[in-house]
Image: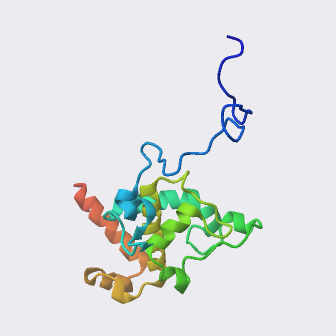
Amino acid sequence: MHDAPRYDPLEASVVFQKGISAQPLVEGTVARGQYHDDNALLYQGKVDGQPATVFPFPIDRAALDRGQERFNVYCSPCHGRTGEGNGMVVQRGYRQAASFHTDRLRDSAPGYFFDVITNGFGVMPDYKAQIPVEDRWKIIAYVRALQLSHHATTADVPAGEIDKLDQPASAQMGAGKEEAGHKAGGGHE
C-alpha cells in the first residue's frame, strides 16, 4: 500500500503513449456546467458572430448600482472612477489605461467591451475568472452611463427635469430635503 497505483501530476508513465501521466483533454470535451453555446449573447457577447449591440437582460437601477460597485473594485484602479484612464495604478507608473470617453469606445458595441473584459486586450488582463458573467454586463452598463454623463446634452434630459438645470444645486438639494420631510410626515411649520 505504500506504493499506490496512481500518478502524481506530471509523473512519468509507461502506460500512456507520450510517457507522461498528465494527458490533454479529449477534443470537444466540455466541463460540466460550462457549455454555454446555447446563449452566445450572455456568455460570449456575440450575435451571429459579431459583437452584440444589445444587453442580454434589462438594465435597471439595481444593475447600474451593481455595475458601479464592481467597476470601482475591478476597473477604477486603472481606468479611474470617471473612466478617464487615470486610475491610481496609472498615476503610480503603470501604463496608461484607455479612456472610455473617446469616440472609438463610445461608438463600440457592448459586446466589444464584454470581449475585452472576458479575454483581455493589450496590457489589460482577462477578468473571466474574477468577474461573473452577469456582473461583466452590469459593468458595461455602468460604463455606458459614465460615457453618457460626460457627453450628454440638454436633449438627453427628460422634459420634466429640464427646468431644474437652471436652478442652483443648493436649491435642488433643499427641494429634495423638503419633499423628504413631507413624505416622512414631518413637514415644515
Q: Nearer the viewer, residue 178 or 67?
A: 67
Relative vertical location of residue 180 with respect to residue 145 in this rendering, above or below: above
In x, y percent, where is residue 11? 73, 33
Relative vertical location of residue 31 with respect to residue 131 in this rendering, above or below: above
Q: Quadrant of the N terminus?
A: top right
Q: Residue at x 71, y 68 (%)?
A: 90
Horizontally, residue 129 falls left or right of residue 139, namely right
Query: Which quadrant would residue 154 be assigned to in this image?
Result: bottom left
Horizontally, residue 163 falls left or right of residue 96, namely left
Q: Residue at x 41, y 56 (%)?
A: 134
Q: Residue lying at the far top in this picture: please name it.
A: 1
Q: Quadrant of the C terminus?
A: bottom left
What's the image's color scheme? Answer: rainbow
How many dots with numbers? 0
Q: Nearer the viewer, residue 74 or 175?
A: 74
Q: Residue at x 37, y 84 (%)?
A: 165
Q: Residue at x 44, y 72 (%)?
A: 110
In x, y percent, where is residue 83? 56, 72
Horizontally, residue 127 falls left or right of residue 153, namely right
In x, y percent, where is residue 102? 56, 83
Query: Which quadrant would residue 127 be assigned to in this image?
Result: bottom right
Relative vertical location of residue 79 with respect to residue 15 in this rendering, above or below: below
Q: Nearer the viewer, residue 95 or 126?
A: 126
In x, y percent, where is residue 64? 40, 63
Q: Residue lying at the far right in this picture: please name it.
A: 93
